[in-house]
Amino acid sequence: MDTVVSGIRSTGNLHLGNYFGAVKNFLRMQHENKCFFFIADYHALTTHPKPEDLHGNIRQVLAEYLACGIDPEVATVFVQSDVPEVSELYLLLNMNAYIGELERTASFKEKVRKQPDNINAGLLTYPVLMAADIIIHKANKVPVGKDQEQHLEMTRRFARRFNMMYGVNYFPEPDAYNFGQQLLKIPGLDGTGKMGKSEGNGIFLADTPHEIRKKVMRAVTDTGPTAPGQEPSEPVKNLFTIMKVVSDQSVVNYFTDKFASCEIRYGDMKKQLAEDIIKVTDPVRERINEILADKKYLAKVVASGAEKARESAAKTVREVREIIGYKPF
Ligand code: TRP
């Protein structure tokens, strides 16, 4: 059985793309592995969130993952800052992370470009904290998207370097979790590329039916097919892609035929699509609100997650201290 660690950004709500992508994979993973899922709220500080927003963001993201079916009885679900052991491992790893390699990290260079007035040391050492998150539980698998591959590569390097430096075979070098062909990509509503948090093209699980209808009706299309057998344009293809995920096959067939015979009315298609999306998201949205209202339940989940995560983390830190040479007097 593999040990899996995955950090979840504490900003941004889950959208349909996350729901059919990362979240579905989490649900599958949790039953097949020993999983640690945590809200990365130390990492969140690199962007200087306001104190009055921080806690609300953490609660919201946690509630959304739980509502999707992450099971805290099966996986260890916790909040990063509840496990301060990770900050000690981060400190220790920082001693053999080199400025040059940190400055060359793609995500750091991008931040330097995008937020030149807040290039803090936390950003520079972001990959070290992420490595600590992972190896503190001696994980051997990490589910990562393309944007995190370099960070995982650095994690492997830091683990290997520690082992070399102290002549031990202590930390495993974690690999990317391989999802095979099962990764579903959901496109956005703006006609280009995939659904994202910042692109303004997303449907969020927390959106009300009214908001969803409005967004779908505004989705980009084109002037319609002019000859039978024509290929749909990119934006229309995207609507069909979403439809294939949320609608019944008969509905997809109906609109595919209408398109092929040039009789399609995008307004009708969008109305149907909106209702089918709502059928998927509405029970989740209700569950999110239920969980958010249940303070006791959330407190219990977080406390038991922290206890399990700390047990595993404290053991590692204790052993690492010993390897490094700290001794009791
Ligand atoms: N950097 C990850 C992201 O932006 C979040 C993260 C933090 C993470 N620590 C992690 C992911 C450890 C996997 C494992 O999405």
Image (cartoon, rainbow, N blue to C red):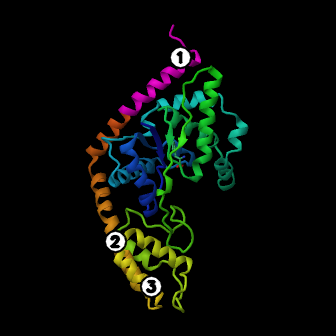
Residue 313: percent from left, percent from top: 45, 29
Q: Please tell me which residue is depicted at 39% across the width and 28% down the height of the picture.
A: 311
Please tell me whether the stretch drawn in magenta is mainly helix, strand or loop.
helix
User: Furthest-right residue in view?
Assistant: 100
Residue 132 can be seen in this image: yes
How far separated are the C-alphas under marks 2 and 3? 19 Å
Is 73 above or below relative to 210? above
Label 3 environment density (alpha carbons within 10 Å; few <14, some 14–19, many ≥20): many
Image quadrant in which the N terminus is located: top left
Q: Please tell me which residue is depicted at 59% across the width and 47% down the height of the picture.
A: 149
SS class, disc 3: helix
Residue 266 tag number: 3
Which residue type carries mark 2? Pro
Residue 47: percent from left, percent from top: 56, 49
The residue lying toward the viewer, choosing from 325 and 244, is: 244
* Horizontal side of residue 229 vs 243, given as left or right: right
SS class, disc 1: helix
Residue 322 tag number: 1
Q: What residue range appears in magenta?
A: 307-329
Q: Earlier in the sequence, mark 1 or mark 3?
A: 3
Answer yes or no: do the residues labelled 2 and 3 have beta carbons within 8 Å? no
The residue lying toward the viewer, choosing from 312 and 48, is: 312
SS class, disc 2: helix
Residue 209 tag number: 2
* Horizontal side of residue 205 vs 133, given as left or right: left
